[in-house]
Image (tube, rainbow, N blue to C red):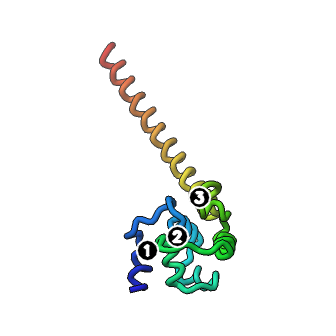
Amino acid sequence: MLSEILSEQSTGVFGIDNDTLGGRICSARETLGLSTAQLARRLGVKTTTMAGWELDRSEPRSNKLVMLAGILNVSPSWLLTGVGESPSDEISTNEIATLQGNLVQLRTQAISIAEQIDRLVERLDSHEHFRGT
């Protein structure tokens, strides 16, 4: 049963989002690329306990919440309320490199399209000029 819950969580069948404490825990955990079991081990709790928190069936005590926030690299207030900087607000070095590569590719395509447009306009202009004389 637990493996089914964890499997469903990782695939988003439950529709976990950032609107609840459990959703924020799950979101921050996924941002770090950790499984529920890995996060539970790091925090020193059972996987079923962590799964219960992520499913909003229970909540961590304050000492575990503070430890959890530290592991997830978020503030305890963000975990509790969603106010403040979320883990998804940060862009990794790999993401920046990917975005820069995409921008270069799009600029190159835009220049190529603009050149094609210019050639077509010139061709039409010369054709219309030729027909008009």
For the residue marked with disc 1, what is the amino acid? Answer: Gln
Q: Residue at x 36, y 26 (%)?
A: 124
Kindly identify which numbered label has been placed on residue 26. Answer: 2
Residue 60 is at least partly visible in this image: yes
Q: Residue at x 38, y 29 (%)?
A: 123
For the residue marked with disc 3, what is the amino acid? Answer: Thr
- Describe residue 129's horizontal placement relative to residue 20 as left or right: left
As drawn, 37 above or below 29: below
Q: Residues within 10 Å of mark 3 (few under 14, many from 20)?
A: few
Q: Quadrant of the C terminus?
A: top left
Residue, disc 3: 81
Question: First in sequence: mark 2 or mark 3?
Answer: 2
Residue 96 is at least partly visible in this image: no
Q: Nearer the viewer, mark 2 or mark 3?
A: 3
The image position of residue 78, as x and y in percent, is: 62, 60
As drawn, 48 above or below 8: below
Dot 1: what SS? helix
User: From mark 3 to mark 1, how far is it between C-alphas?
Assistant: 21 Å
Q: Residues within 10 Å of mark 1 (few under 14, many from 20)?
A: some
Q: Residue furthest left?
A: 131
Q: Nearer the viewer, residue 61 or 71?
A: 61
The image position of residue 37, as x and y in percent, is: 54, 83
